[in-house]
Image: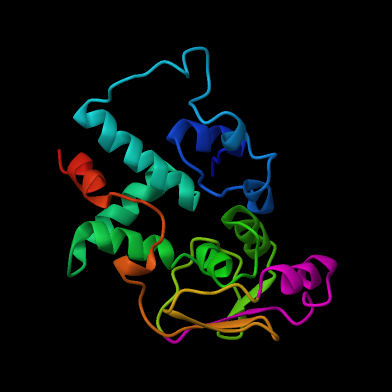
Amino acid sequence: MSKYIGPDCRLCRREGMKLFLKGDRCYTEKCAFARRPYPPGQHGQERKKLSEYGMQLREKQKVKRIYGVLETQFRRYFEMAEKMKGIAGENLLSLLERRLDNVVYRLGFASSRGEARLLVSHAHFKVNGRTVNIPSYIVKVGDVIEVDERSKSKTRFVEIKEKYANKPSPKWLEKDAENLVGKVIALPTREDIDMPIREHLIVELYSK
């Protein structure tokens, strides 16, 4: 499967906002977007007026980059969202929020979604007692997510427990920070998503 291997900070600059792809670095003066808050490239500082299609495309790209999803998989999520009851755009965001890598990040068991994806793929997490190494695994209400007992003593997880595990989690997740265990107690709603996303633009783009 292909994946983006370029610099993450370039993606933030392209979307004109911090996507918090680099964990702690995003909160320091080293953040590339803080130093150069304009698109990369020779003509990055030129003001450009986006067309309606351009705005829709940029919104889709932004959401893909926030959650670390490529086009084929993102379209598949949209097709799933359309078949679900409710509003397609909100269903899409709910599916993305329920990805295992995002849940690990939301619980504070990783510094960024990128690190969460790496930790999940290296089999450091269990869901309902079974090891799951698929970052795109969609969790359900009642699922229990925990760090594998053998991984808790590893240096990185000791650091994670000290630095991130006590940060607030969204209300649809329940967390035992001391034991690095979380539980899905409800499905995420639109109000639980704190990034500035205009999902209706994505629906309009795919509906053409």
Residue 180 lies, in percent from the top left, at 67, 81
Color theme of the render: rainbow
Depth check: 26 or 121 in front? 26
Q: Is residue 6 visible?
A: no
Toward which corner of the image does residue 6 lie, by quadrant?
top right
Please state if 62 lies on the left or on the right of 78 as rendered: right
Q: Residue at x 37, y 49 (%)?
A: 74
Q: Where is residue 153 shown, x and y percent of the image?
A: 83, 77
Is 94 situated left or right of 157 in this image?
left
Residue 153 among those drawn in magenta = yes
Q: Quadrant of residue 86?
A: bottom left
Left or right of residue 202: residue 70: right
Region rendered in magenta: 142-165
Instruction: Out of 87 and 168, give the one closest to the viewer.
Output: 168
Q: Position of residue 163 (x, y in %)?
A: 72, 68
Tell me, yes or no, whether the highlighted magenta stretch contains residue 205: no
Say which residue appears at 40% left-offset and 49% top-offset.
Answer: 73
Q: Front-most of 80 and 62?
A: 62
Residue 71 versus residue 90 in the image, above or below:
above
Q: Residue furthest top?
A: 42
Q: Up-down: is 188 above or below 194? A: below
- In the rendered image, is residue 207 in sight? yes
Viewer-nearest residue: 203 or 172: 172
Residue 96 coordinates in the image, percent (x, y)? 40, 60
Screen quadrant of the N terminus: top right
- How many numbered discs? 0
Query: Which corner quadrant holds the C terminus?
Result: top left
